[in-house]
Image (cartoon, rainbow, N blue to C red):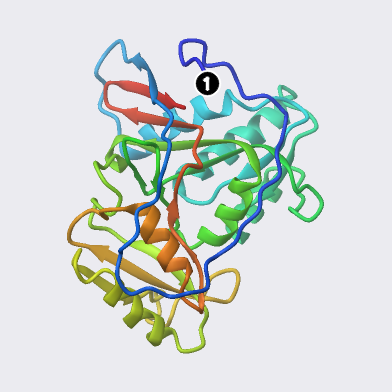
Amino acid sequence: MASLSLLSPPSTSSSASSFCHNSSPLLSLRTRSLTIRTPIKTFSIRAQSAPVLTQDDLKKLAADKAVEYVKSSMVLGLGTGSTAAFVVAKIGELLKSGQLTDIVGIPTSKRTEEQALSLGIPLSVLDDHPRLDLAIDGADEVDPDLNLVKGRGGALLREKMVEAASEKFVVVADETKLVTGLGGSKLAMPVEVVQFCWKYNLVRLKELFKEEGVEAKLRLDEAGKPYVTDNSNYIVDLYFENPIKDAYAAGKEISSFEGVVEHGLFLDMATAVIIAGKSGVEVKAK
């Protein structure tokens, strides 16, 4: 178990990851998953004064703290989204100055790939580097057990693949992302589905969570057309009236639907979450 008082960067040892989905669809959340949760440790760095900080300022604070985990010669998962973009920018800056060397980045989206290339960060893919030392990414929601909702940026499938293959997964977020239960922000929890008969799965997802109260919508792009992911799929966004009662059972049952590619519940994946607030930076780790 990591000691937050030391905040020592992660080691470069790695472990392989694998995935499997149940194939039998269920339309009600009947099952409960037996989960052993690791105690959460918290370390806070309080600001000496109280400057007026924007949300971007908070994201940059969290990103700068997360990059302290990065060491030369690491293979890194590079996340997607506004907070992760600050991380990628900082890594590019450290490489340019020579403070970091021999870094290999595995991007989680085409947007991140383009940013990293523009900064001179060497890139590769999971096929060539199936084990990563560290992944750093943002989150849309963080619950007290460090479970996450991710994917409002549309990259949830690649994010989950890269982050599951990483020895350590450090999350950067600002304090607005904290929730008491996943789905509690009343913002989108994405589900990536194949284009074929997408409405069929939208209806099934809505039926699955009818007791929780949920609105299911096909995500649209700026032109009003269906949003298409980097993997040529659609996204159905779920908006919960109340937090999800059992995220583990929910994730399992969503994955059991034929035509569902991935969902935005990232459970038992984060090893540390760095949260920037107006009073300072807080680090929570398992």
Seen at 37% across and 31% down, the residue is 275
In the rendered image, residue 272, in percent from the top left (x then y), is placed at: 48, 30
Q: Is residue 112 above or below residue 1?
A: below
Residue 239 is situated, as x and y percent measured from the top left of the image, at 26, 64
Q: Residue at x 61, y 45 (%)?
A: 78
Residue 152 visible within the image: no
Q: Amino acid at mark 1?
A: Met
Q: Quick one: label 1, few (<14), some, or many (20+) residues within 10 Å?
A: few
Q: Residue furthest bottom?
A: 197
Mark 1, residue position: 1
Residue at screen point 52% across, 79% down: 194
67 displayed left or right of 126: left
Q: Quadrant of residue 179?
A: top left
| Above or below, comparing residue 173 to residue 244 in the picture | above
Give the camera-side residue of 255 and 33: 33
Seen in the image, is 28 located left or right of residue 286? left
